[in-house]
Image (tube, rainbow, N blue to C red):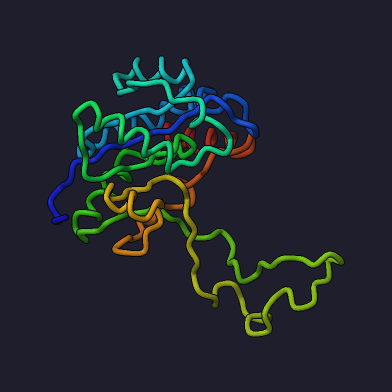
């Protein structure tokens, strides 16, 4: 792979079922269905060759088609279960497009639960891929709290040894900055995806940093309300 702009297939997975937040992909967030925020961001990125929605939800299919976004199939039921893996969903979409004569170099997974991820984030992630001639780019944000202050608890809830003596009396600002996956952008060479069967490949994969306020992952009613507030503020 060279550092020239590759052909990129963006896949937005949006199944009907959701245990923690019922119907979240079609739930109206700041005036739009949740999934629409991601569809519009992806379609506004000039470096993506194809944006595809993978869903088993007729409402999501309707939203995608209303936005002129590709939704060429209804996702098979065995790929729309709680235990269905994102990798299998992505492979199904890649192979569907390949069978239709459309092949790509890279795949980008854009989960609809990241509505504050904008088109320029997507563009910048792809540009980083091109600059670094990377196999993959994954979005991250700074941890809200250092994981060095975290630990498991024994059955009796004893706090003995909970924090390492090496950091016991250190201020958080004196500790290393940690980062976490924020779930907003996964960009990977399709060849690497099949070789590693994971988006977290070890070879030539780099981070794209996003701010905490654009990294909200909607998984609960509280997340939804926070995203609503932040989106409303950004539109003022």
* Quarter of the figure with the N terminus: bottom left
Residue pictured at 43% horizontal, 33% vertical: 13
In the picture, residue 165 is in which quadrant? bottom right
- The extreme right residue here reads 156
| Total marks placed | 0
Q: Is residue 209 shown left or right of residue 182?
A: left
- The extreme bottom residue here reads 166
- Which residue occupies the foreground of this view, 108 or 83? 83
Q: Is residue 65 shown left or right of residue 88?
A: left
Image vertical order of residue 189 relative to residue 74, above or below:
below
- Which residue occupies the foreground of this view, 106 or 32? 106
In the picture, residue 174 is in which quadrant? bottom right
Image vertical order of residue 200 relative to residue 149, above or below:
above
Q: Position of residue 53 (x, y in %)?
A: 37, 28
Q: Is residue 134 shown left or right of residue 81?
A: left
Image vertical order of residue 85 relative to residue 67, above or below:
below
Q: Is residue 87 shown left or right of residue 137?
A: right
Residue pictured at 47% horizontal, 15% vertical: 58
Residue pictured at 38% horizontal, 38% vertical: 90
* Quarter of the figure with the C terminus: top left
Q: Position of residue 159 (x, y in %)?
A: 80, 72
Residue pictured at 19% horizontal, 54% vertical: 130
- Which residue occupies the foreground of this view, 10 or 232? 10
Q: Position of residue 30 (x, y in %)?
A: 49, 26
- Which residue occupies the foreground of this view, 230 or 79? 79
Image vertical order of residue 45 relative to residue 158, above or below:
above
């Amino acid at each position: 792979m060279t550092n020239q702009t590759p052909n990129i297939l963006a896949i937005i997975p949006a199944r009907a079922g959701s245990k923690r937040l019922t119907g979240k992909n079609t739930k109206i967030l700041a005036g739009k269905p949740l999934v629409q925020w991601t569809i519009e961001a992806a379609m506004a990125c000039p470096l993506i060759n194809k944006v595809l929605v993978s869903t088993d939800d007729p409402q999501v299919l309707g939203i995608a088609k209303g936005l002129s976004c590709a939704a060429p199939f209804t996702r098979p039921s065995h790929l729309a279960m709680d235990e269905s893996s994102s990798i299998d969903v992505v492979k199904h979409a890649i192979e569907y497009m390949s069978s239709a004569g459309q092949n790509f170099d890279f795949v980008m997974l854009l989960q609809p639960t990241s509505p504050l991820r904008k088109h320029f984030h997507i563009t910048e992630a792809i540009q980083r891929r091109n600059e670094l001639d990377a196999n993959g780019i994954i979005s991250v944000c700074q941890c809200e709290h250092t994981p060095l202050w975290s630990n498991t608890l024994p059955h009796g809830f004893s706090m003995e040894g909970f924090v390492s003596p090496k950091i016991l009396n250190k201020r958080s600002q004196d500790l290393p900055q940690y980062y976490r996956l924020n779930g907003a952008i996964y960009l990977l060479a399709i060849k690497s995806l099949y070789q590693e069967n994971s988006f977290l490949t070890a070879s030539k994969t780099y981070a794209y940093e996003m701010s905490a306020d654009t990294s909200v992952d909607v998984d609960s009613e509280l997340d939804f309300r926070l995203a609503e507030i932040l989106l409303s503020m950004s539109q003022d």
